[in-house]
Amino acid sequence: MEAKKMMGCGLYAVVLILFCNPIQVRSDGSDHKYKVGDPVPLYANKVGPFHNPSETYRFFDLPFCSPAHPKEKKEALGEVLNGDRLVSAPYKLDFLQDKDTEIVCKKKLTKEEVAQFRSAVSKDYYFQMYYDDLPIWGFLGKVEKEGKSDPSEYKYYLFKHLHFEIFYNKDRVIEINARTDPNALVDLSEDKEVEVEFMYSVKWKETNTPFEKRMEKYSHSSSLPHHLEIHWFSIINSCVTVLLLTGFLATILMRVLKNDFVKYAHDEEAADDQEETGWKYIHGDVFRYPKYKSLFAAALGSGTQLFTLTIFIFILALVGVFYPYNRGALFTALVVIYALTSGIAGYTASSFYCQLEGPNWVRNLLLTGSLFCGPLLLTFCFLNTVAIAYSATAALPFGTIVVIFLIWALVTSPLLVLGGIAGKNSKAEFQAPVRTTKYPREIPPLPWYRGSLPQMAMAGFLPFSAIYIELYYIFASVWGHRIYTIYSILFIVFIILLIVTAFITVALTYFQLAAEDHEWWWRSFLCGGSTGLFIYGYCLYYYYARSDMSGFMQTSFFFGYMACICYGFFLMLGTVGFRASLFFVRHIYRSIKCE
């Protein structure tokens, strides 16, 4: 009865939160029809250094002309998590109303405001706006460095005239471009008060592009022929790797295992007193439960949940939910789906822990709930404090933090507990094809390359080599301004990653058992998850060699959140590696007769 009540509360909370913070399946605004002279919504979003995507500030943190009564747009959960803070802009772009040169305001910038703008221009600040849900980008100014070697001699200019070019089809807005007038500049090089006239002009043009296709131009950049060639090269490279690896492993393992089976069958017929060798020799220890079984079961539960989350995200991506500039849809989906899949983590961890004859399933459930969320929470608290210190839009408002806490308290935790109770009551027994002896055998001395770290290095390198080309495009999208829309290719690469991880872990598990080392449980998990460590190593390379990110806030955001993502990959791929190894080990020991 209590379980049903908790389930009801959890589902009610999900409905309430989704009602208040919906996933924006389409923010194109299919009802956005206008008549001549109708006001079309224009929102100023944020400004920030172009090379530091996480370091963004409110548009009016800089001393622009602000409207008399600025109106903040109500935002969904994902938009707030994305750092969007939309507020009404001072420009009036009414439907089909051309304007030659309209003055927004005349403003006398103080020395401090001039220094503020100069600092922004020197850091390549850009602005972002949304007009009828279409994004607008532009730079605030330019730095003139020609013929000057000393930075103190550089000239800093602020653009004061924006020209909007808007395309329409009948009663709909289809496209908008904003460009700055290169001749309308304000010199900010000296610390003195400056008079500025902020201006804009508007030109409307007709187009035949239908309203339904107006967002397509933003996804074309990632579908250009030379980009597609690189993506297909990445897939072909990965497929060749997979085919070679799987062919090699299948040939070797099938031949070796066949010889093993023939040899063991012959040994049984020939001499019962002959000493066994190889993986059959440790049949009484191979299914001995691992150390730290509670942590192991919790890691499997968290990994299974993250795997399910990834699959659901791919499904949403493939059906077109995450089209370009669907503000915050990915973050909303991540939060909601993670909350709803917590029952999977509870069920998997609890049932496996009970199969391993664990004595305290409640403590195991607490460990499962905090294994991934704990490090993520600590990282978030530190980075949110940094964002607050910088007054950046990445700092979450108190209300959003309360919403996330309510999702955790009313959805995630109850579903985790319900899953744990269901797992405990499933009463499934661990399926071991051979009996485990009372006392463990001693593991013979092994060479250094059979240790955990060298094996993890070998296991992680091949899966990483299959995905590293695609990683660049993902990083350039998440930590840059490139648009990524080829989710079908990404899904193929993900499938390849899973296959390679499973095969390489199975191969290393076989060689470990053949060396009479029966402690394969943790090793298979660590070897499977080691690709996450390689991805974090790639983060170092990307930060220093492929990006221009700088500053304490951007650096801490990049390495902090990438550590959480790579840790999630470690748990997910570790689970895949262990499950594949468990299937393989059960299969080979089921195929022989053991005393």
Image (cartoon, grey):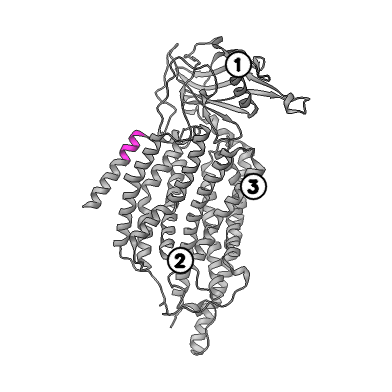
Q: Could one spot residue 132 in this view of the protein? A: no
Most distant residue in the left direction: 1
| Nearer to me, 595 or 447 | 447
Q: Secondary structure at mark 3?
A: helix
Res. 396 image quadrant: top left
In the rendered structure, which amino acid carries the disc numbered 1?
A: Lys
Q: Position of residue 27 (x, y in %)?
A: 43, 29
From the image, state whether disc 2 or disc 1 is nearer to you: 1
Q: Which residue is mark 3?
A: 541
Q: Secondary structure at mark 2?
A: helix
Q: Which residue is mark 1?
A: 160
Cα gap from disc 1 to disc 3, whole angstroms? 39 Å
In the rendered structure, which amino acid carries the disc numbered 2?
A: Phe
Q: Which residue is mark 2?
A: 583
| Nearer to me, 162 or 276 | 162
**Where does the C terminus fall, quadrant-wise?**
bottom left
From the image, state whether disc 2 or disc 3 is nearer to you: 3
Q: Position of residue 311 (x, y in %)?
A: 44, 48
Res. 298 image quadrant: bottom left
Which contiguous range is marked in magenta?
Answer: 14-20
Answer few, some or many: residues within 10 Å of disc 2's Cα (few below 14, many 20 plus, some between 14 and 19): few
Q: Position of residue 135 (x, y in %)?
A: 52, 26
Which secondary structure type mostly characterizes the magenta part of the structure? helix
- Which label sits on residue 55? none
